[in-house]
Amino acid sequence: MRLLPEQLERHLTTERLAPIYLFSGDETLLVEEVGDRVRVAARQSGCTEREVLHVAQGFDWRILTRASENLSLFATRRLLEIRLPSAKPGTEGVKALISLASRPPPDTVIFIFCPKLETATQNAAWVISLDRAGALVTIRTIESGALPGWIAARMRSRGLLPDAEAVRLLAERVEGNLLAGMQEIEKLRLLRGSGPIDIHAVESSVADSAHFDVYALSDACLIGDQARAVRVLFGLRGEGLELPIILWALTRELRILAGTVVELERGKSIEQVLSGIWERRRPIMVRALRRIGARRSESLLRRAARVDRYIKGSLSGDPWEGILDLVLGFSSASTDVIGNLRIESPFNLSN
C-alpha cells in the first residue's frame, strides 16, 4: 500500500494500523512529523514500549532479527523503529528486511525511516516486500517555489500574521531548510507573541546568530531573565547541541538549588551554604534563591525527569517542548517563599 502524507489521516481513522510503515523522504522535519502522527496512533492502539535501531556502518543485522523476535514482558504491544542512513541497506540488510516483511512479529508495529527512494529503488525487492506487508509513505520535498506558501501557512498555524515581505525574507534566510524555518517561526512566536509580523521583526530575529553554551542558559534561568533564556535555548538547538546535555546542565543547577534551600531551612547562613560554589557564581545563586523555594525546585525537578523520559521514549511527549516548558518555569520571575526565611545577600547584585 502506497500512501502520501495527505492520505495518512484517512488511513489512520478508517483502517487498522499496518504492521510495517516505510517512511521515505529527504526533508527531516516533514518525515519526523509524519512519523509522529503514526506514532500517536500506535500508542493509542496499545504500543506502550518503543525500541529504536540506528543502522550505521558495520551494523549487525542479526540485531534486527533478535529485536523482532523478542516479545515485550511489560507491554501488550510495542513499536520497533529502524533508521536507515541510506536507501541502500546492503546485501545483508536486504535479506533481513525481506525476512522481516515475510514474517512481521506479532503485537508489533514497525517503522522504517530512510532517505528519498529513487524510482529505480522503489522497485527493489526489499521495498516491494515491505510495501506489500504494510505501507510505503513517501514524503515529498518542498520545492523552492512552494516554500513561501509553506512558511506562511506554518506561521498562521502558530498564530502569526506575516506580511508578504516577512515571508519572503524568512524563506530566503532559511535557504530551504524547513527545520531552521520552524525554529525561526517558534522564536518569532515566543519573542513577539501572536499577531502581525513585518519584515523588521524577521530581520531582528533571524539576524541573531550568536553562539551560546549551556552555562549561558543556566545563568539566564538562575537570574530569571526569561527572554534571554528562551533565546539561548533556541540558539543551542539551532547549533545542534544534544538535548541530554542541555537537560543535564539545567538539572544540575536545580539539584544544587534544592539542596541549598534545605540547608537554609535547617538554619545555615547563606555564606555557609554557598561556600562550595564558585565565588563568581554566588550572586547568581542568590538571585535564584530569592525566586525559587523548596516546593518550586521540586516541581522543576519533576519536569526535568519528565523530559528525560521523553528523550528516552518511555513517555509520550515532545522533548523540545518539554525542555522549553522547563526553561520557562525555571526562569519565571514569580517568587516562592522559602519557609519563613529572609535571604540577606553579602554579594553585590547590581550587575
Image (cartoon, rainbow, N blue to C red):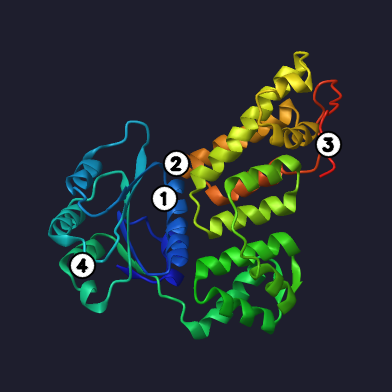
Residue 164 — which label?
A: none
Indicate the amino acid at tag 2. Answer: Lys
Which badge, 1 or 3, comes first in the chain's sequence? 1
Q: Residue furthest front?
A: 279
Frontmost of labels 1 and 3 is: 3
Cα distance in 3D space between marks 4 and 2: 32 Å
Q: Quadrant of the C terminus?
A: top right
Residue, disc 4: 128
Residue, disc 1: 42
Residue, disc 3: 348
Which badge, 4 or 1, comes first in the chain's sequence? 1
Q: Name the secondary structure under disc 3.
A: loop
Give the percent coordinates (x, y) of residue 50.
Answer: 38, 43
- Residue 322 visible to the viewer: no
* Residue sitting nearer the eye, 278 or 237: 278
Indicate the amino acid at tag 1. Answer: Ala
Q: Which residue: 71% across, 40% down?
A: 222
Which badge, 4 or 3, comes first in the chain's sequence? 4
Which badge, 4 or 2, comes first in the chain's sequence? 4
Q: Which residue: 81% across, 21% down?
A: 339
Q: Residue furthest bottom?
A: 145
Give the percent coordinates (x, y) of residue 203.
Answer: 69, 74
Please tell me how crowded label 2 is: few (under 14), some (14-19), or many (20+) other residues with Cα within 10 Å.
Answer: some
Q: Name the secondary structure under disc 1.
A: helix
